[in-house]
Image (cartoon, rainbow, N blue to C red):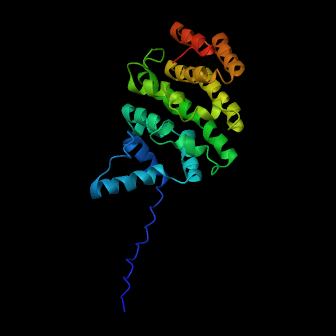
Amino acid sequence: MTRQPVPTPVPTPVPTPVPTFDEWVDYCFTQGMPDDRAGFRGPEGEAAQIRLGRFLDIDPPVLAGYVIELFQNPEFVADRYADDQIADTVCFLFGSPSGYFHKLRSRAVAIATQVECLESVEPFYLRLLDRVCGRRGIDPDGFLSEDVELDGAVYMIWDLDCIEGGVMFHEKWPHLVEPGLRVLENVLMKSRTCACMKSALHGLGHIQRYHPQQCERIIDRFLNERQAPAWIREYAAAARTGRIQ
């Protein structure tokens, strides 16, 4: 009789523990950039891959809760992390290295929670970014996005291919359009630093082709009601017609 080979038992995968909020925050601000998911080799690389996946592949409803908690109460970040760490984390949170805002718009996240995530971007600007931009308030009127890494990262928030899509495409996410435009308007009208104003104008300039009347109204209000340096007013005029990069 031919002996049948005994199948090799398949090990049961050990569940990867969900990071706590504090672990997640520290990962974002110390190791979140750049996206190094590809290219791991050997046992050490595999361990790093598992660790990276632990922070990138968080269950979307859990991620939503963490984002809301961080964005609504971000003041501690200014004292805990350096400007270059905050700059990298802005690119990580809002951009493709994490893809978080794509996950936050998934069907796994309740519509009301999607709206709350987007609305929480406003306090993240006003309570943190507006405090640390402009060389931590020393030069609030300066044109610094090309010279200061943090101001440049903030400028790009709405052009990182994640967050702005929810505001642009009414047919896909109709519940996010008005909240997103409201966030941009409030950031534009309430920020002290030109870095945050320019960031909001950058977003409005890209969204203008999809919602021209709303964007023009917001920018007209800014030009009529706020005192601002000539350079930011010129940028606002360009954003009003979508003539920005």
Taking 54 as reference, is 215 left or right?
Answer: right
Q: Is residue 227 visible?
A: no
Quarter of the rendering containing residue 223: top right
Task: Looking at the picture, tell me which residue is in the foreground, 214 or 73.
Answer: 214
Residue 173 coordinates in the image, percent (x, y): 68, 38
In this view, 168 is above or below 109:
above
Residue pictured at 37% horizontal, 77% vertical: 8
Question: Exactly how many numbered labels are in the figure?
Answer: 0
**What residue occupies the far front of the structure in this picture?**
1
Task: Looking at the picture, tell me which residue is in the foreground, 172 or 235.
Answer: 172
Taking 170 as reference, is 19 left or right?
Answer: left
Residue pictured at 70% horizontal, 33% vertical: 170
Q: Is residue 207 visible?
A: yes
In this view, 211 is above or below 19:
above
Task: Looking at the picture, tell me which residue is in the foreground, 41 or 177.
Answer: 41
Residue 232 coordinates in the image, percent (x, y): 53, 12
Task: Looking at the picture, tell me which residue is in the foreground, 157 or 194.
Answer: 157
In this view, 121 is above or below 43:
above
Taking 223 as reference, is 234 left or right?
Answer: left
Residue 197 coordinates in the image, percent (x, y): 55, 20
Residue pictured at 66% horizontal, 28% vertical: 181
Where's the N terminus, which quadrant?
bottom left
**What residue occupies the far top of the structure in this picture?**
230
